[in-house]
Image (cartoon, grey):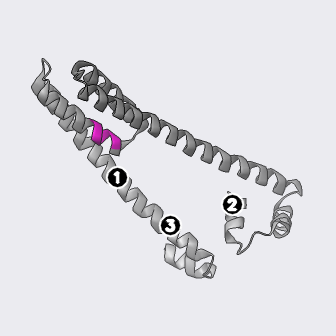
Amino acid sequence: LALFEAVLAQEAYDEAALKAQFSIEGSASAFSVAKHDLIHLILDCLRSYHQEKLMEVDLRRLLDHIVLLRDRGLYEMAGKWIRRARKKAEDMGASETLLEILRMENAHEKVYPSKDHEGRLAEIFKKETQALEALRQESETMKVHDGVFRLLQQRAKLPAPVVHQKLN
């Protein structure tokens, strides 16, 4: 992360200055190792982001299939697929999509009640409440993230003491 912070502090990327900075702090190879590690970290983050997007696409496709099943009168199968989609959304931590699925499940349960109808509705309501709380927490996290991002953007334009003062 030291290399990342050093690159971030630069107005324009200057590899020679970075090499000089890292050769003073350690050996001449410290820069090469740090650069290699940083590149791999960035690529891992990008791969993770891409994989998450693929999982969201699969989940969205599953929801489309549920609507098609329901529209064709295949209610029992649609109910099974709703539960499968709920499990997948819970495993992914996809709170917004989970809330949508829970509302589908709620509507399905009301029209096609299970043996434990009241218990199922109570369970769905509880999970909806949990999903809403997760969304609230995600929103709070994004507020903090956005604040830090704005400070980092300003960091390139402001002297370091001003940024430090803003962080405190």
Mark with earlier residue (2, 3): 2
Give the side of residue 14 with respect to residue 138, left or right.
right
Mark 2–mark 3 distance (CA, rounded to whole Å): 16 Å
Secondary structure found at label 3: helix
Q: Residue at x 23, y 40 (%)?
A: 128
- The front one of 158 and 54 is 54
> Mark 1 and mark 2 in contact (Cβ < 8 Å)?
no
In the picture of the structure, the residue carrying the numbered disc 3 is: 148
Q: Residue furthest right?
A: 28
Q: Residue furthest front?
A: 72
Mark with earlier residue (2, 1): 2
For residue 123, the mark is none
Three-letter amino acid code of the residue under disc 3:
Val
Q: Tally the numbered discs.
A: 3
The residue segment tinted magenta is 97-101
Q: Residue at x 32, y 24 (%)?
A: 81
For residue 137, the mark is 1
- The front one of 124 and 1 is 124
Mark 3–mark 1 distance (CA, rounded to whole Å): 17 Å
The image quadrant of residue 28 is: bottom right
Three-letter amino acid code of the residue under disc 2:
Phe
